């Protein structure tokens, strides 16, 4: 309940209480479900305020003009085997005296956490693993995407103790208020190779009261430093390696094929209003395509051979590269459609996941619609779809432009089949024709804001029909 949040006595207690209002899906989320156009749907008063300020200073407020600029934001990244050991010195170097460590019960037992505790103790940095109110001067997240996103929110609401939780949540569910204050330092140490959350300013959660997946996205939310230590991802079981790697694959493919930033409207009236998810742009392109090539090369090896440390290490790097790519460009249909797929799970339990409840891992839920999605988006930009197919090893020299989507779809399909243990479409997850309406309805809150999806119509009925066709096409491959 949001109301409960407002009466919490201290910032830290309040942050904890806020976290109870949101619920992280299991397995860890990735930071992509959020509304890529959150600032487009900014609360009107907020937009008006910035527009007024802009016009006072003699700038136009071109709400119907297209974007003309793009911006690159990412955390500092340090990458190397064993680099977790340096984190104590980092906090000492920045003068932090009290560090709030955010983790979860699984990671708490892993070597990553032991390394962290040793590193902090060695440098005499006081810390507390988050479980009770604490007034830290810095945050440290050790875990998957959910843990890192939780730490981002704790940092945010510690700095804004009087804000209403929904103030910063993406519109239309929240007010989409931009983060104007500098937050406390946050260091993120990922223990999975998937979400790329250590690089982005996005935090994703299920808003229990609204039964919706949404998030908070702003550059000022991004970690100060991401410490990517390939030793920390060795503990992932093969099934988790596969699904988190498929998340990376979709981050790369979707950000590479998202509408170009220059097609997005409106042009922001103030740079603080420029969304993190801007559409494809020349900087994110480099990261997205590189991440795609690495994933195609190393994910199968990393899944099949638990001792292939080179492949695991390259997958952690690919996850981070893709994080920078989609963190600045955004994602589209695979992620938008994955919300109702995992949320309306008819009872599927993915093999290799040690849980007692039905589960469609995030990476599986995004990849399952991949062939259908890229068949659909192909005509929007045949060159990019062909380049992506080429990254899968397809000889594209004689492929017709009009076949670009189909050729990429085939390449993705073959990749998924060879990877193994993947559903061959929604039917394998237990979905049938009777679920189509609900799947479409469940995507609309996402699709309304999926303005980065190329080829998706803006009129509601037309959009619904397109989504229905997409889900139908995704039933089997
Ligand atoms: Fe994702």
Image: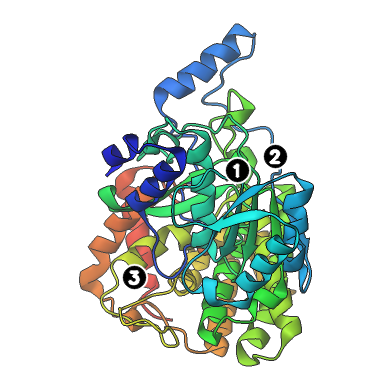
Q: Is residue 430 above or below residue 132?
A: below
Q: Quadrant of the C terminus?
A: bottom left
Asked if the residue at tag 1 contacts the one at tag 2, i.e. Cβ–Cβ closer than 8 Å, the answer is yes
Q: Secondary structure at mark 3?
A: helix
Q: Secondary structure at mark 1?
A: loop
Q: Is residue 92 above or below residue 382?
A: above
Tell me the quarter of the picture where residue 15 sits.
Answer: top left
Question: Horizontal and vertical percent for residue 294?
Answer: 72, 73
Residue at mark 1: C-beta within 8 A of ligand 1: no
Tell me the quarter of the picture where residue 432 sits.
Answer: bottom left
Whether residue 294 appears in this view of the structure is yes
Labels 2, 3: front one: 2
First reached walking from the N terminus: tag 1 or tag 3: 1
Whether residue 453 appears in this view of the structure is no
First reached walking from the N terminus: tag 2 or tag 1: 2
Mark 2 sits on what residue?
71
Question: What is the spatial separation of the Cα atoms under label 2 and label 3, in whole angstroms?
Answer: 37 Å
Mark 1 sits on what residue?
278
Mark 3 sits on what residue?
472
Residue at 75 percent of width and 74 percent of height:
397
Q: Secondary structure at mark 2?
A: loop
Question: What is the spatial separation of the Cα atoms under label 1 and label 3, in whole angstroms?
Answer: 29 Å
Q: Quadrant of the N terminus?
A: top left
């Amino acid at each position: 309940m949001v109301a409960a949040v407002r009466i919490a006595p201290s910032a830290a207690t309040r942050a904890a209480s806020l976290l109870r209002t949101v619920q992280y899906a299991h397995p860890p989320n990735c930071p992509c479900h959020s509304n890529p156009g959150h600032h487009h749907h900014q609360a009107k008063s907020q937009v008006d305020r910035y527009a007024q300020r802009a016009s006072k200073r003699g700038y136009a407020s071109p709400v119907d003009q297209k974007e003309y600029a793009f911006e690159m934001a990412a955390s500092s990244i340090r990458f190397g085997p064993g680099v977790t050991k340096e984190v104590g010195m980092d906090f000492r170097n920045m003068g932090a005296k009290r560090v709030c460590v955010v983790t979860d019960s699984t990671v708490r037992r892993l070597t990553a956490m032991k390394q962290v505790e040793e590193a902090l103790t060695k440098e005499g940095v006081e810390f507390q693993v988050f479980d009770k109110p604490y007034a830290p001067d810095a945050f440290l997240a050790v875990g998957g995407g959910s843990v890192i996103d939780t730490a981002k929110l704790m940092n945010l609401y510690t700095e804004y103790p009087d804000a209403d939780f929904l103030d910063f949540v993406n519109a239309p569910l929240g007010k989409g208020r931009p983060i104007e204050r500098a937050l406390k330092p946050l260091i993120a140490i990922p223990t999975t190779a998937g979400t790329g959350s250590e690089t982005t300013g996005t935090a994703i959660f299920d808003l229990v009261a609204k039964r919706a997946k949404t998030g908070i996205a702003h550059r000022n939310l991004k970690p100060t430093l991401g410490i990517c230590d390939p030793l920390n991802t060795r503990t992932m079981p093969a099934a988790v390696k596969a699904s988190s790697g498929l998340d990376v694959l979709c981050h790369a493919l979707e950000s590479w094929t998202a509408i170009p930033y220059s097609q997005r409207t409106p042009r922001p009236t103030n740079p603080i209003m420029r969304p993190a998810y801007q559409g494809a742009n020349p900087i994110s392109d480099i990261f997205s395509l590189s991440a795609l090539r690495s994933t195609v090369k190393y994910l199968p090896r990393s899944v099949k051979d638990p001792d292939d440390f080179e492949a695991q290490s390259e997958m952690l790097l690919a996850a981070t590269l893709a994080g920078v790519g989609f963190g600045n460009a955004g994602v589209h249909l695979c992620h938008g459609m994955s919300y109702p797929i995992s949320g309306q799970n008819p009872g599927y339990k993915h093999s290799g996941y040690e849980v007692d409840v039905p589960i469609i891992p995030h990476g599986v839920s995004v990849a399952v619609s991949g062939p259908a999605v890229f068949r659909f988006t192909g005509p929007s930009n045949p060159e990019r779809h062909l380049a992506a197919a080429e990254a899968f090893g397809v000889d594209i020299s004689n492929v017709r432009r009009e076949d670009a989507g189909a050729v990429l779809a085939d390449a993705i399909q073959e990749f998924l089949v060879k990877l193994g243990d993947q559903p061959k479409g929604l039917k394998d997850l237990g979905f049938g024709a009777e679920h189509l309406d609900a799947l479409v309805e469940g995507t609309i809150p996402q699709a309304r804001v999926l303005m980065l999806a190329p080829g998706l119509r803006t009129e509601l009925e037309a959009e619904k029909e397109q989504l229905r066709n997409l889900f139908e096409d995704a039933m089997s491959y």
